[in-house]
Amino acid sequence: MSTRLLSIWLVFVTAVMLMFATPALAGDAESGAKIFSANCAACHAGGRNVIDGAKTLQKDALEKYEMNSIEAITYQVVHGKNAMPAFQGRLSDAQIDDVATYVLSQSEKGW
């Protein structure tokens, strides 16, 4: 195999691997589950939303509302929005990272 063909093949294989790779998550989902249970489950049990049924934590809803990233979920938890309170000052940065990781991982699993 020529060097040029080998280079093209390696670029292709790398691109395919990146397309199907699961993004690295910032926090600890196991810790996030406990924090979620204590602080979020009253309104979001099972990935639902008791205030606004359309804005669940399900994968399709997170994608629709552009909340399908650690950064977006973290921002929402830190600052709150509408009926959701801000958790900045109530939870540490590490706890918020863990919750965001848990929510994103659960949305990928279908809750």
Image (cartoon, rainbow, N blue to C red):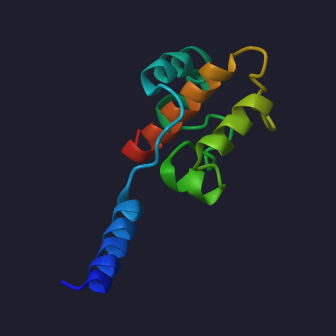
Outermost residue to the front? 3
Q: Nearer the viewer, residue 45 or 11?
A: 11
Q: Nearer the viewer, residue 37 or 3?
A: 3
Q: Position of residue 23 (x, y in %)?
A: 46, 48
Q: Is residue 85 left or right of residue 15?
A: right
Q: Position of residue 56 (x, y in %)?
A: 58, 44
Is 72 situated above or below 89?
below
Q: Which of the 4 quarters of the picture holds residue 72?
A: top right
Q: Residue at x 46, y 33 (%)?
A: 46
Outermost residue to the left? 1
Q: Is residue 106 left or right of residue 9?
A: right
Is 1 situated above or below 110?
below
Q: Position of residue 40 (x, y in %)?
A: 60, 24
Q: Which of the 4 quarters of the picture holds residue 92?
A: top right
Is 77 situated above or below 72?
above
Q: Which of the 4 quarters of the picture holds residue 10?
A: bottom left
Q: Residue at x 72, y 37 (%)?
A: 76
Count all numbered tags in the image, as a single digit. 0
Q: Residue at x 18, y 83 (%)?
A: 1
Q: Residue at x 64, y 40 (%)?
A: 73
Q: What quarter of the picture does the C terminus occupy?
A: top left
Q: Position of residue 52 (x, y in %)?
A: 67, 42
Q: Nearer the viewer, residue 83 or 34?
A: 34
